[in-house]
Amino acid sequence: MKSKLTLIVATLLVAGRSPAEVIDADLLIVGGSESACAAAIQAARLGVKKIVLVNDIGWLGGQFSAEGVGCLDEWIVVDGKRTNFPRSGLFLEMVRRIRAHNSAKYGKACPGNAFCGTETIEPKAAADIFESWLGEHASQVRVLRGWEPVRVNVKSGAVTGVVFAKVHPEPRPGETCEVRAPLTLDSSDWGDVIRLSGAKYGAGPDLKSRFGEVSAPEAFDEAGAQEMNPISCCVVLRETLGKDATVPRPSTYDPASFKSLDKGAPWVDSDMSAGIYSPSGNSPYTHRRLVDRWHNGFEPGAEATFINYPVQDYPLCQLPQRVLDALEKTEPGASKKNIVHLTPAQRRIIFEDAKQHALGVLHHLQTAVHDRVGDFPQSFRYMRLTEEFGTPDNLPPKPYVREGLRLEAMLMLREQDIRAAGREPRWARLMPQDAAFAFQFNIDFHPTRRRYLTDDRNGPWHFIHTQDRGWHTDTDRAVLPLRGLVPVEMDGLLGCGKNIGVSSVVQSALRLHGQMMHVGQAAATLAAMSLREKAEPRRLVSDASHVRELQLSLARGRGGPGLQLWPWQDLTPDDPHFEAVNLLSVRGVWKPEPEDVFFRPEKTVTRRELARLVVRTRRLLPGAKDWPEHAQPLYGDVPAEDPDRREIEAMVSWGDFAPLAGKFLPDQPASWATLHAWLTRLKLPVTGGLVDGTDHGLKRADYPLSRAEAAMHLWRVLQMGGEVCALEP
């Protein structure tokens, strides 16, 4: 009882005392995750002068580093095969930095040969990369370490600042600081700023009555609102060159908890040359191997891997009795709360038990599994815990957090908005025009529950998947709306991590390394515009002209690759048509074919396709006319049932096309001269070089018009013609 009262009193003292230091900033970023770092870098590049980033630990980089997830998740399915989602923005820049580091150290950009991903990076190296990256903006970005939020100041419905306490096992009065800023980005692991501010949010499963999602529960059962995507304590290992490195038996260890490891091979001899997720390459060892020295011919001692296997997942509901008892000692009823609602000190009680579970996995692999399969060079028995984290237990300073709270935002993405109808992802049902970035991943719930094997709730348990919370449900290619970053009510605050405006189901598909960096880049771009305009983000994301300006900034990038707004598979920021295709796509000018996720830039445009594009472009410019009505088709080869009849007849009706020819030849290829003539007849701006001159004896007018060329020309038409900005609901 005494310790409980001490904790409560100390917490009240920390929350109520005047802070020892007050810092004024233009932008406050709370957290040190990959999204926080991306936000700080983007904001600095956009000219924000005084940025303060407050992290609760020393390391920056989140999943890449502090959480120990050094094998990057980014795979999708295209044409039935697993590949990577197109990289862009600051994430692409990070991947390039990772590859440069690996090339310098190992002579190979991708040294891991991992089952789950093509890119790997060792945790300390990732932390150093983020540290160096932010250091490039040291004159604008101040980093405070070892502080966690305890109070959020709100005035007139807007967040004005955050009070932080120094991180200790228990709060200590007096060690506080306050950062005041007109705008705060919440990049914390669990969404603590959003929670403490009083902004609306959700945590745990959404009931079916909330969003009508097919996989949502009708009502809570005994797991209740505590059920979430589990945490995992990653175990990063390095080879010992034959020396036994078996960890001591954890106090909570029971071999029955890890029976799933007693069936398959702990290691397979695979160089993953057949590609990621090749069936022959899956084992706990190769699953997320960081450095494969055996197949790459590296020097002995270079081998490194880490364990993040399903048996290691730690569900956040149905907790062991020892954890429930420890939570209750801190506060009556704490054991029944969702982890989001717990204090940082209470969460650490759960984390410590999760660490013991992870060490139990390693101990089992080093003992029971080793004894079963025999001796071999890559045995876990000869892999030691890395010392690079600098922690007393040699485990990462943070668990891998897959799900926190979810902001109640101006627009919420739901399962039915992105869930795929089949196994081959296409285009999401909802593609908002205020797209902040493109994404796609499967609905990916790791085991969310546990089943105890005896009546002893401190005894062995097995992880279980529920029927509707698994990892084999596909989603379509989608976009996150800018409105998904903005609270439905609270001003001065943006979501900037896993805490954005999505349901629990959607969050399981929107939590990867790259996706979170995209969130940070988009949130910072919105924040920079908000500070420049002295206007709240909610006003900006509701105004079409500001949304279009913001999207242009994102697509162009600032000091780095542009961010992809529309999920074409074959579009990269290095393409000269990247900006044009993205911005025409989010405007609805370039609409993809339902069954084709490729832009196909070199493909020649047909006359019917070009007519569609020209008409859609014309309708975005001043003086747009109503759709014409013709009782009979104007062209003999464009019958009444032709899907493009309306656009073709609108174009010739709006422009100076008289007299009309008898046929339109809709499926004939369009040329540069075709585009020039049609733009001229519609009195639209004509860009130079479409028809003048020759090239190696061929008239430019006769060039076949490619899709990339059409996009770039029509994008210039919009820019020159003075687009009338409008957003669909």
Image (cartoon, rainbow, N blue to C red):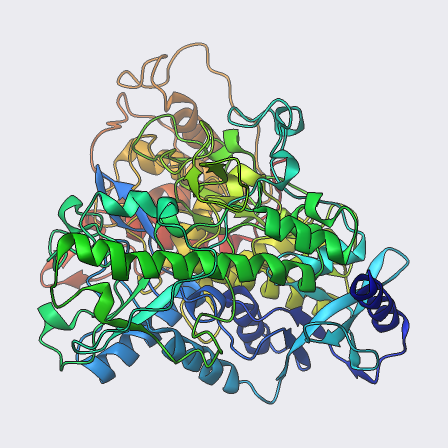
Looking at the image, residue 388 sits to the left or right of residue 244; the answer is: right
Quadrant containing the C terminus is top right
Q: Position of residue 368 (x, y in %)?
A: 25, 54
Report the residue at 51% width, 75% height from top.
60
Please name the residue shown 40% across and 52% down the image.
312
Side of 29 relative to 471 (left or right): right
Tell me the quarter of the picture where residue 661 sits: top left
Q: Choose between 693 and 374: the one closer to the eye.
A: 374
Q: Nearest the camera: 652 or 218?
A: 218
For the point 23% across and 83% down, the residue is 105
Instruction: Please tell me in which quadrant of the rendered image residue 39 appears.
Output: bottom right
Residue 492 found in image quarter? bottom right
Q: Does residue 452 appear anywhere in the picture?
A: yes
Q: Is residue 220 above or below residue 307?
A: above
Q: How many marks?
A: 0
**Residue 83 drawn at (x, y percent):** 25, 49
**Residue 34 x/y as whole percent:** 50, 67
Can residue 72 be seen by looking at this rendering?
no
Against 632, residue 180 (above or below) is below
**Which quarter of the figure is the N terminus placed in?**
bottom right
Q: Is residue 657 left or right of residue 619?
A: left
